[in-house]
Every structure is written in structure tokens, then in C-alpha cells.
């Protein structure tokens, strides 16, 4: 923290002082006039809390003015004195009148709070900041405190004379809405049931609320003063400079769906009711999708899709609504009507319409759409209509999910346009700010005193000394290495040509441009200050992460790092931003590998998240001057990002680290030998190979191409050779890292040779598999599995490899070394269990069943502790298991009188039909007893999965010639080639 920040903190951190709002000389409304909530048909004054402007609640919230009212509440803008910001306070009517609604709404807010913080829907729903109760004349009133927002989408719609919202804004509203619904449906198990334009609010900048406050002070709103209360007129918010993103609000009608109860309640606004609600069919999350489809139409077309006005009664009726649906979509399918509790009210037994009013003339959605038809873009219009059809389906199960709709083609196309505009606006603002700063007069203009001239003379003598403050601020190390230039670069060619012409010229090729534009804003540094955490805990966490994964990865120079660690704590030196970023990244992983929760986290942060966020805040984009330590930081951030489910972020961090290391030449041998000590050379070498294996791991897990080819790398492997004893103390034994690198090379070969695009040349798929398996065998690993003798031998090898992986992970768990929050550990459990489920489905066996049970137990334990990836993998495995069970049951039923199937009926006690309890949801990992065989050393699977004789022949190239020469097993390999090919991977 800077000196200026320290001096200003007591001032800037003080709570706001209450304001004195005018109470006299304000506009008065006659007492006989009904205004605001008084106009409601069932208005009872004593049910409403008599809030007054200037009133302070809970010694914290001062009411500024009224924003609106409804049948069950009034909403006010207030000043949060403690947090120095504006909030919205919602006063509900007297508690006895609300029943259980508020408890239900509070439960929904708790579910949202406990949902994963990485879910994109977290920012698309309105969070509850605080709740309390206040005493009114007739009893208690609940109060909810929310972030202050601007107008609703409905208000925005009314601002346009056409009652339509521009297409890109519609797409943005939809994307945010579907993110919010996906959070509610998939993570919170909640249906909103009250989606409408008035419940989708837009964010506003703080200036809008400040302006509202100033208006209340200088031009108070009209009011009617009664003996027991004051009725204030609501005041509209002004137009913000920056309109924030849409947010889904109001969970007063939300319903939790995580029980076994069928829900048939009458829900939703009338014109947005789904068919199943009108027909009395049990409803679920899909009612929100129908509701959203109707809202989409309203805001894009400027008219309601349905009205439901009965031609005889003149009011809304369900029969009129159903008739309009039939005009739009055609008659409902019989499969839907068969489930309807109110079928007889609207239809005959044969499905004929008998509701007593005529069905309007057919008017399909293609005919009704006019907004996009006017624009002339037929493809865009068809994409929009396709989106509407995904939501407006008679049968609930045929509607798309919120997650699928958020990635719809039409939405992505138009939201990309908005994102592009926003980027251009940000760029323009930055350019204007730079021009404004450059136009400011220099502080050194004008005359200078004798003292100043003397200071300048002294400064001239020190001109060759680097300004460490400026160097640090711009992210540039005083001893930074020049960026590496490859042989293919034109500058390197020119330098070699110059050396040929003039042997005395000793030019080092590099890719840096000395005149490049620089400035602090390029670094995008969020904060330049931090506070050191508790020394003892920090020391333990760093040593923990070093103990846990330090053997396999080059995380830091051990002696040098702890020397810097001691200096920082002794001197309270927090000036080195990069080292601080490095420290917090290590602490995040250290806390991650130190936590074993006895109870589930219920969606709370993964251990280490706070440290990780601090590291992100200190991270600088020093792309023009990368450093080895910066690459290490990016590696650590990539590693941790995997553990919290941010897989794409992990891939990007790793990619940036890879590009930066290439610019430093870490992948080349000659770039590590000039002017560096042996210790620094070894550090660069180990960092490179750590990055190399992490790139292979992440690419294989995501199925992405590799970041660099093996052919472009010639740097040596890690070793202790040439290191003094002091230098050796900086590193771990290299054998673990070397072994890891060898396996990563094989992983890279699998990605490039097996999971590559179809090769129509002479290299066959079997040849590529053969090459990879031979490489794998040379390094004493195992893999592979499936129909002809060779294929079955590969299948058995694959199964044994999965058993080996399963056993190793179970032993790690027993010994307390399994990373409960680790990403790769959960991924290994998932991938091996998929193989075991396939094997157990084909040939049930007790050992396979125990192995799968163990895997579910481990994943359940990890998921219940808050491991994001484990939750996802557990759900996927449950889906696979349930699908296999359903398929098997259907097959057994259909073929009961026919020939027996390969799947034994006894498999119900084995892998395929074992019902997997949601242990991570009920918070009990004890639902899974660990098989006793896993506590015995004799449970180790066969040690050589590639020891099968058919594998021996397959790997022995001398047994046949490639690609089409003679072979003693020619027919077998022809069959194998037919069974496995590019079609297996690419589905061609």
C-alpha cells in the first residue's frame, strides 16, 4: 500500500454521514386524493410499513426516495452508510399477511448464494445483500436489501414508440436470462415461474442514484401527509451514462423442485402460462422456457404472443389461451393430453376441441413475425424463428434447456456484435484518456529554482542508474533477457548476413523492437498493493504445495524463494509485485492441497480461491518483457484454474505462458547457455518441461491441438549435471519430472497420431496406433481395449490399465494423498471408470463392480467437499449408468421370449444397474462403503497390461511389413483395421 493510500484510508473508509432531507416547504397532495399504493383494489393502510424519507434503518440504511410499489411491497432507494453506496430496500406488507412466501424466497436466495461462483448466471440474478425486520403499526415487516438497479426491460420497451427493443439488445437480454435460468435450474433446483419484462432489470451507474439523491434534496417529491403516515409519490431514475447488463429479479413466486412432489399449482402470469399449467399436467423447469419464449416475442415484436381474452366473457380464460396456442402451433399431441388432469374440460376422449369457443384461424409463428421480416435478412429471421420453436413446444420435454438456449446461433451472432461495439467504445475511451493526459501541462514547465537546478545536476550524474520504481511499475525486470528470435525470422537472417560480411560484428539476434510503445495501461494491473498473510501459515502452505506436487513440477527455486520470503516478512517489503503474485498463487494451491472437509462445502469457495483472486489482481500483462518468474506464475494460475472448473481459463493461462517461454527461447538449447549461471539454466530448463507437460495434459483433457511440436524443441532434459551442491539444493531430484515428460510425449503422440484429422495418405490408423503403443511400451506404461483377437487383446489391456489407475487413486485416497480439490485426479477417476463401466456392461465381474463402486465413492467424496470438476464428472457417470440401465431393461423386456442377450440378468448387482445415490447432494460420503479388497496389497491389478500375446505380435514390427506387406496374421489385422479407423474418432 502506498504512503498516500495509508494516509487517505481513515478518510476514504469512513461511513457516510446521514443527510438532512427537507421536511417543510415540500409539494403537498390533497388528503382526499388517492395516490400510489392507495389505488390498489385491496389496499389496507396498516398492512404497509410507513417508511419516511431520511429514516435510518438498522443504523445503516438511510431512505432517500420511493422507487415503486406493488400489492405486497414498496421499494425505496437508500444510502448504505457503512459501504458508502446506494441500495434498494424492499418493505413487504405486514408479515402475517405474507404467509410462507418470504421463507420460500429466502430459501431461494440461500440456494443462489451457495451456487458455484464461477457459473455465468451468478451475475445474471439479483443477489440478496441483507434482510431484517422492522416494527410497524400493525406488526413486523420483512425488509430485503438488494443492489440498486435501473429500469426494467418493460420500462425500456415503453421508451420506444414501436414498443420494440433493438435486436442486439434482445439477444443480450436472452443470453443473460438463459444464464440466470441455467443457474436456477441446474445448480439451485428452482423454477422462477414469474418471468416477465418487469422482472428483468438493467444495471445503472452510480451517477444515476447520486442524481436521484440530489433531486430529493433540492426538489423534494410530492407527498400526502396523513396522521399516521406519509404517502410519497414515486420518482423515476434518470438516464444513466452506462447501462448495465440485464439481471433477473423477484423470486417471490419461485418454487424449489428438488423433492419427489408433483407440482400442479397454478403459476405464471396469465398470458405467459405454459400448456401444462392450463391443462393440469405436472410441471417442472420447462415452464420457465415457455415463459421466456413468450417474453422474447413481446419485446422483439412489440405485441403479446397470446392474450387469452375469452370472446364470450371478455376476460382472460384458459380455454381462450389454449385456442390461441392451437392457432399458432396446431393441435396438441395425444401424448400430452393423456397426462392432462383437465383434458375433459377442453377436449373429448378422442382429442377433439370441445371448450365451447371456436379456434382462431391458423396463424403460425412464421406468419406473425414482422420485425425481422422488415429488415430483409432471411437467414437471420429463420435463425430467430428456429430459436422460438426451441421454446414454444407443446410437450415440455421437447423444449431446449436454458444452457442450450444460451448458446443458440442467433443469440451468439448478435451478442458478438454488442461485444464488438463495447470493445470499440473501451478502445475509444482509452485513446481519449491518453490524449487528455498527454495534453496536460508538464510539471517541469516554466522556470526552475537554484535548488531544482542543483537537483538536476545531481540527477545527471546518476543517469545510468535504473529507476527501480518505474521499472517495477511497468513490469520490466532490470536484468530482463532479450526476446528470443528463431532462425526463420528475417531479423535473425539479417544478423547472420551481417556476421558473414563483418566477422567483428558480434550481434545477438532478438525479436524486441526498442522503440515500441509502452505505458502502465498496457499491463492491465488491477492493484499494485497487497498485504502479506500470516507468516507461519504462508510458510506451511508453500511447503505443502512443494511437498504435494513439487517433485513433478518446477514451482520455484527453493532456497532463493524462501530467502526472498524471509526478507519480505522481516522488512514488510511488498514492493515486488511479481513475487507477491507468485506467493499468492502458491498459497492458493497450498490451501487447496491442505483441505479435507469433514462436511460438504454447500457450494462455498474452493479452498485457496481468495489467494487465487489476489494473485489475479497482481497479475500483469508483461508480454513485451516476459520473465521466467512470470511464466511460473501463469503455470500456477493455470494449474489452480483447472481445480475450480475454469478449464478454458487454464488453457489460456498455459497458452500465454507457452508463448512467453518461446519468446524467451526456453525451448531451445542455445538460448539457455549464454551469460547465465548453471543454476539459472537449469531453472529455465525445468520450467520449460513443466510447461511442456502441462500443455500436453490440458490439451489432452480438452481435446485441443498441442501448443508446440516436439520437432521444435531441442533443450536438454532436467538434470543435476554441472550443478554445485548449493545449486542442487534449489531443485528436486529430476527423475520424477523426466518420467512425467516422457509420459507427456506419449500423450502428445496420441493427440497428433491417433486423435488427428483423417489422413488419406499412406499412413493407416492402425499404423499410427502401433507407433504410439510401441512408444508407450518402451516407457513401461499401459493402455488400450475391443472384437477380433487383437482388438480384444487391446480391450483387455485397456481394462487392466483402468483397473491400475483405479487402484492407484484409491491407494492415494487411503494414504491421504489424493487431491480432494484437484482437477486431474477427478479426471483420471472419470476416464478410468468409463472404461470399467463399458467392461462391466459387456462382462460383469465382482472386481469391476468394486472398482466402479470405489470410483463413485471417491468422486462423491470429492464432489461433496466442493470439487467443481468432480461434481460434473459424477453427474456424467450417473447419466451413463442410468442410460445403460434403461437400455438393458428395455432390451430384456423386448427379448424376454427371444434368444438370451450378452448382458446377464444378474448384472443388476453389478456395474450396469447399480443405482448411484447423489452422495454429494445429501452431504454424506458414507453412503459408499469402501470395498475391503482395496485395503489389501493383493488387490493390485496385473502389472503389464501390454503383456498379452496378441499385443506382443502387434507390437513386433518384424512379424509383418507396413503398410501392405505379408503378415502371418494378415486376416486378423485386416479385420482390426476394419473395426478401428478414423470413423471411430470422427464419426465419418
Image (tube, helix red, strand yellow):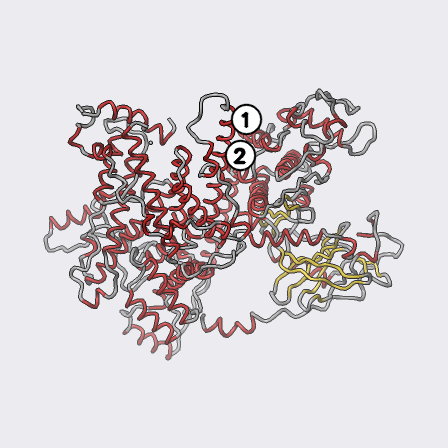
Occupied quadrant, residue 148: bottom right
Up/down of 18 relative to 345, above or below: below
Residue 340 location in percent, x, y? 70, 30
Direction bottom: furthest residue? 451
Quick one: label 1 or label 2, which is nearer the N terminus? 1
Place of residue 663 in the rendered image (x, y in percent of width and height, measured from the top left): 28, 51
Residue highlighted by disc 1: 378
Q: Is residue 19 left or right of residue 720?
A: right
Q: Nearer the viewer, residue 103 or 441?
A: 103
Mark 1 and mark 2: span between their CA atoms? Answer: 12 Å
Circle 2 residue: 410
Asked if residue 609 shows in the view, the reply is yes
Q: Residue at x 67, y 60 (%)?
A: 131
Q: Residue at x 80, y 66 (%)?
A: 24
Q: Is residue 834 left or right of residue 177?
A: left
Q: Which of the labelled discs sits on residue 855, or is there none?
A: none
Element type at marker 2? helix
Residue at 45%, 46% in the rendered image: 856
Quarter of the picture holding the N terminus? bottom left
Amino acid at each position: 500500500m502506498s504512503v498516500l493510500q495509508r494516509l487517505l484510508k481513515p478518510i476514504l473508509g469512513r461511513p457516510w454521514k446521514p443527510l438532512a432531507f427537507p421536511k417543510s416547504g415540500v409539494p403537498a397532495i390533497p388528503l382526499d386524493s388517492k395516490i400510489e399504493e392507495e389505488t390498489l383494489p385491496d389496499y389496507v393502510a396498516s398492512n404497509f410499513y410507513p417508511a419516511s424519507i431520511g429514516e435510518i434503518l438498522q443504523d445503516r440504511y438511510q431512505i432517500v426516495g420511493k422507487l415503486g410499489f406493488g400489492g405486497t411491497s414498496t421499494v425505496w432507494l437508500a444510502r448504505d452508510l457503512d459501504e458508502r453506496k446506494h441500495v434498494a430496500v424492499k418493505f413487504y406488507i405486514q408479515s402475517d399477511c405474507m404467509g410462507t412466501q418470504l421463507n420460500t424466497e429466502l430459501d431461494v436466495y440461500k440456494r443462489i448464494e451457495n451456487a458455484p461462483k464461477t457459473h455465468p448466471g451468478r451475475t445474471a440474478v439479483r443477489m440478496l445483500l441483507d434482510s431484517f425486520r422492522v416494527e410497524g403499526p400493525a406488526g413486523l415487516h420483512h425488509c430485503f436489501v438488494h443492489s440498486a438497479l435501473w429500469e426494467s426491460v418493460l420500462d425500456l420497451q415503453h421508451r420506444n414508440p414501436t414498443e420494440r427493443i433493438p435486436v442486439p439488445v434482445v439477444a443480450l437480454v436472452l443470453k443473460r436470462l438463459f444464464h440466470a435460468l441455467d443457474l436456477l435450474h441446474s445448480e439451485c433446483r428452482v423454477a422462477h415461474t414469474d418471468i416477465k419484462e418487469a422482472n428483468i432489470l438493467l444495471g445503472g451507474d452510480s451517477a444515476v442514484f447520486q442524481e436521484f439523491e440530489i433531486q430529493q434534496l433540492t426538489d423534494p417529491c410530492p407527498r400526502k401527509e396523513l396522521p399516521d403516515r406519509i404517502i410519497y409519490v414515486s420518482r423515476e431514475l434518470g438516464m444513466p451514462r452506462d447501462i448495465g447488463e440485464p439481471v433477473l429479479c423477484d423470486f417471490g413466486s419461485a418454487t424449489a423442485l428438488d423433492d419427489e412432489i408433483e407440482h400442479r399449482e397454478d403459476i405464471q402470469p396469465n398470458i405467459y402460462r405454459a400448456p401444462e399449467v392450463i391443462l393440469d399436467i405436472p410441471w417442472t423447469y420447462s415452464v420457465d422456457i415457455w415463459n421466456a419464449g413468450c417474453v422474447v416475442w413481446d419485446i422483439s415484436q412489440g405485441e403479446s404472443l397470446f392474450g387469452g381474452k375469452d370472446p364470450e366473457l371478455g376476460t382472460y380464460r384458459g380455454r381462450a389461451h389454449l385456442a390461441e396456442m392451437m392457432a399458432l402451433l396446431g393441435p396438441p399431441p395425444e401424448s400430452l393430453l393423456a397426462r392432462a388432469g383437465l383434458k375433459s374440460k377442453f377436449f373429448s376422449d378422442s382429442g377433439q376441441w370441445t371448450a365451447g369457443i371456436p379456434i382462431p384461424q391458423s396463424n403460425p409463428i412464421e406468419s406473425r413475425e414482422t420485425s425481422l421480416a422488415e429488415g430483409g435478412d432471411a437467414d437471420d429471421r429463420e435463425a430467430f424463428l428456429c430459436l422460438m420453436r426451441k421454446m414454444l413446444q407443446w410437450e415440455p420435454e421437447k423444449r431446449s434447456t436454458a444452457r442450450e438456449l444460451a448458446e443458440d446461433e442467433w443469440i451468439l451472432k448478435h451478442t458478438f456484435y454488442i461485444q464488438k461495439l463495447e470493445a470499440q467504445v473501451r478502445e475509444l475511451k482509452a485513446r481519449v484518456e491518453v490524449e487528455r493526459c498527454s495534453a496536460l501541462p508538464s510539471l517541469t514547465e516554466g522556470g526552475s529554482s537554484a535548488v531544482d537546478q542543483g537537483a538536476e545536476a545531481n540527477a545527471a550524474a546518476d543517469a545510468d542508474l535504473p529507476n527501480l520504481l518505474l521499472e517495477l511499475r511497468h513490469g520490466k525486470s532490470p536484468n530482463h533477457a532479450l526476446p528470443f528470435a528463431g532462425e526463420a525470422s528475417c531479423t535473425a537472417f539479417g544478423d547472420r548476413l551481417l556476421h558473414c560480411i563483418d566477422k567483428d560484428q558480434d550481434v545477438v539476434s532478438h525479436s524486441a523492437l526498442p522503440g515500441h510503445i509502452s505505458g502502465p495501461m498496457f499491463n492491465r494491473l488491477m492493484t499494485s498493493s497487497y498485504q502479506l498473510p500470516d507468516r507461519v501459515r504462508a510458510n506451511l502452505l508453500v511447503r505443502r504445495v512443494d511437498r504435494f506436487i513439487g517433485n513433478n513440477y518446477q514451482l520455484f527455486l527453493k532456497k532463493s524463494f524462501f530467502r526472498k520470503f524471509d526478507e519480505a516478512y522481516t522488512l514488510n517489503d511488498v514492493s515486488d509485485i511479481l513475487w507477491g503474485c507468485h506467493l499468492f498463487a502458491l498459497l492458493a494451491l497450498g490451501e487447496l492441497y491442505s483441505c479435507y472437509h469433514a462436511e460438504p462445502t454447500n457450494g462455498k469457495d474452493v479452498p485457496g480461491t481468495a489467494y487465487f483472486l489476489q494473485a489475479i489482481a497482481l497479475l500483469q500483462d508483461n508480454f513485451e518483457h516476459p520473465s521466467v518468474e512470470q511464466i511460473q506464475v501463469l503455470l500456477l494460475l493455470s494449474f489452480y484454474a483447472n481445480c475450480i472448473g475454469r478449464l478454458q481459463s487454464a488453457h489460456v493461462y498455459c497458452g500465454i505462458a507457452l508463448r512467453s517461454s518461446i519468446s524467451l527461447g526456453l525451448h531451445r538449447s542455445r538460448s539457455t547457455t549464454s551469460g547465465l549461471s548453471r543454476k539459472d539454466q537449469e531453472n529455465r530448463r525445468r520450467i520449460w518441461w513443466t510447461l511442456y507437460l502441462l500443455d500436453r495434459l490440458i490439451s489432452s483433457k480438452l481435446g485441443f491441438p498441442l501448443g508446440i511440436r516436439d520437432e521444435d524443441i531441442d533443450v536438454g532434459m532436467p538434470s543435476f549435471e554441472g550443478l554445485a551442491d548449493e545449486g542442487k539444493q534449489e531443485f528436486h531430484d529430476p527423475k520424477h519430472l523426466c518420467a512425467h515428460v516422457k509420459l507427456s510425449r506419449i500423450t502428445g503422440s496420441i493427440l497428433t497420431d491417433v486423435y488427428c484429422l483423417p489422413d488419406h495418405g499412406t499412413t493407416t490408423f492402425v499404423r499410427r496406433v502401433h507407433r504410439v503403443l510401441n512408444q508407450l511400451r518402451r516407457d513401461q506404461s499401459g493402455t488400450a481395449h475391443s472384437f477380433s483377437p487383437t482388438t480384444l487383446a487391446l480391450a483387455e489391456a485397456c481394462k487392466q490399465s483402468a483397473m491400475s489407475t483405479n487402484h492407484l487413486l484409491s491407494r492415494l485416497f487411503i494414504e491421504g494423498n489424493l487431491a480432494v480439490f484437484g482437477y486431474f485426479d477427478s479426471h483420471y477417476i472419470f476416464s478410468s471408470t468409463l472404461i470399467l463401466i463399458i467392461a462391466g456392461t459387456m462382462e460383469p465381474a465382482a472386481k469391476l463392480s468394486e472398482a466402479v463402486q470405489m470410483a463413485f465413492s471417491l468422486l462423491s467424496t470429492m464432489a461433496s467437499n466442493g470439487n467443481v470438476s468432480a461434481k460434473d464428472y459424477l453427474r456424467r457417470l450417473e447419466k451413463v449408468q442410468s442410460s445403460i440401465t434403461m437400455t438393458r431393461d428395455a432390451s430384456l423386456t423386448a427379448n424376454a421370449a427371444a434368444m438370451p442377450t450378452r448382458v446377464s440378468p444378474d448384472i443388476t448387482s453389478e456395474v450396469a444397474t447399480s443405482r448411484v445415490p447423489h452422495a454429494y447432494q445429501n452431504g454424506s460420503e458414507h453412503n459408499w462403503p469402501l470395498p475391503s479388497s482395496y485395503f489389501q496389497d493383493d488387490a493390485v491389478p496385473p502389472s503389464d497390461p501390454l503383456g498379452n500375446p496378441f499385443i506382443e505380435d502387434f507390437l513386433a514390427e518384424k512379424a509383418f511389413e507396413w503398410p501392405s506387406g505379408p503378415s502371418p496374421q494378415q486376416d486378423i489385422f485386416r479385420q482390426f483395421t476394419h473395426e478401428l479407423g478414423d470413423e471411430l474418432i470422427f464419426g465419418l
